[in-house]
Image (spheres, rainbow, N blue to C red):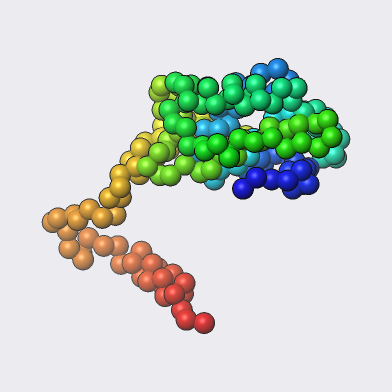
Amino acid sequence: MMLTWDNLLEKIYMGEKVDMECKLAEKAIPQSVYETYCSFANSKGGNIVLGVEEDKSKSDPKERFILRGVPDPEKLREDFWNTINSQKVNANILVDDDVYTVKNGDITLLVIHVPRADYTMRPVYKGENPFKGTYKRNHEGDYHAKEYEVRAMIRDQSSEGNDSTILEGFTMNDIDADSLKRYRVMFNTSHREA
């Protein structure tokens, strides 16, 4: 869903967080955009807004996030699409409407809306090695995913899932009775009729 100028401004002034990232992008797409793209795709999704400078010495959001705009939004958009469809990242999960401009007066911001990648597409990573190029989003930062997190994403790509496999040779004696009891209580609590 494309944001209007007022909606976008509201999100910018709420600050960078798990689903929002602002970058200056004066002449070119910053390389860190691709890390953020991967982290949003591997986490809950989010918006990258190009044309916003952050002054971390300020606490008031309207002073901290300075709307500079991008000088040539069409060139930046083309550069972004060319890069996202190259070997820079392993998967392009975007559609045309996910990359758009929002304009107010002489300020144009470029917005890249990154949805959460389907489990069959994760991990989305930068470069050719998922163990070196997979990022995840926490708070307002992009962080390298740990090896076990990458392995879990790769494992979870299976369309059958891990819970559909029948394990042979096990009986009810192999079930932890306390865990089963806690599960039944949680299940019954969440499935009560109102």
Which residue is at a point 83% across and 30% down the rendered structure image? 106
133 relative to 59 in the view: left or right = left
The vertical placement of 25 against 136, above or below, is above
Q: Position of residue 147 (x, y in %)?
A: 41, 32
73 relative to 88 in the view: left or right = right
22 relative to 62 in the view: left or right = left
Q: Give the quadrant of residue 33.
A: top right
Which residue is at a point 59% across and 21% down the rendered structure image? 79
Viewer-closest of 21 and 9: 9
Res 134 seen here: yes
Which residue is at a point 41% across and 71% down the rendered structure image? 187
Q: Give the quadrant of residue 121.
A: top left
Q: Position of residue 49 (x, y in %)?
A: 68, 34
Which residue is at a point 51% across and 43% down the rendered structure image? 116
The vertical placement of 138 against 134, above or below, is below
Residue furthest to the bottom: 194
